[in-house]
Image: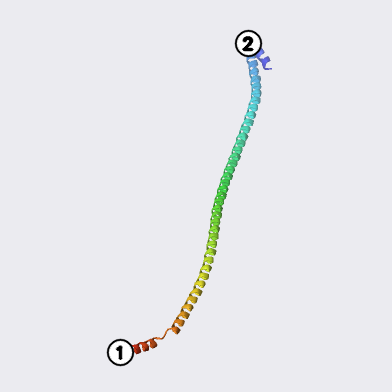
Amino acid sequence: MKNSYKSLTKLDSIEGNYKGAYENHKMYILYRDSLDNEETRKKTIQSQMTYDFEKKEAVANAEHKKELEKQELFANEKSRKQKVVIAFVVCGLLLVIIFAGFIFRSLRITRKQKDIIEEQKSIVEAQKQEVEQQKQIVEEHQKAIIDSITYARRIQNSLMPTEKYIEGVMNRFIKNNKN
């Protein structure tokens, strides 16, 4: 219809029917505009729908990316926290092992020292018993010697004249010699 009115407009114009050409031209414009409006509207609607779809898809992709980034950040943070906790646990275990090693070493040294002290104590007690035995032997010998000296003194005293007797004999001798 559009093309027909265009051809009629040209034909009326050539024939000099300007009024008919004008009317046909108006009809041509009307059909052209209506066709253009429908096509334009269809294209506009299609473009609008494509734009809306792409916009929604872009928003959905952006939200999806944000969600993935959040999840990734959360996972990284969780992983970092786990690494920190593991590091603290490992350090704590190492400190406990080192502390246990020091305690074990000091207990072993203390046991060795205790064993040495026990051994020295038994040696000292054995020496003490030996000294006590020797002391008893010396005391017995001393008592025997003192007893023997006492016995010898008694014997000497019994064999030797007393001092009074000697004095008396000397006095008699002196008297005899004076005379």
**Amino acid at the residue labelled 1:** Lys
Residue pictured at 50% horizontal, 76% vertical: 144
- Give the percent coordinates (x, y) of residue 136: 51, 73
Q: Secondary structure at mark 2?
A: helix
Q: Quadrant of residue 69?
A: top right
Task: Give the colour scheme shown.
Answer: rainbow
Q: Disc 1 and disc 2: Cα gap in Å?
A: 221 Å
**Amino acid at the residue labelled 2:** Ser
Q: Nearer the viewer, residue 98 or 114?
A: 114
Q: Name the outermost residue toward the top.
A: 15
Q: Nearer the viewer, residue 106 or 32?
A: 106
- Give the percent coordinates (x, y) of residue 11: 65, 10
- Eye-nearest disc, 1 or 2: 1
- Give the percent coordinates (x, y) of residue 44: 63, 26
Name the residue carrying label 2: 13
- Give the percent coordinates (x, y) of residue 14: 63, 9
Looking at the image, residue 89 lies above or below residue 142: above
Name the residue carrying label 1: 178
Residue 3, disc = none
Looking at the image, residue 122 lies above or below residue 29: below
Q: For the residue carrying disc 1, how many other residues have a C-alpha within 10 Å: few (<14), some (14-19), or many (20+)?
A: few
Q: Quadrant of residue 156?
A: bottom left
Q: Quadrant of the C terminus?
A: bottom left
Q: Quadrant of the N terminus?
A: top right
Q: Quadrant of residue 4?
A: top right
Q: Secondary structure at mark 1?
A: helix
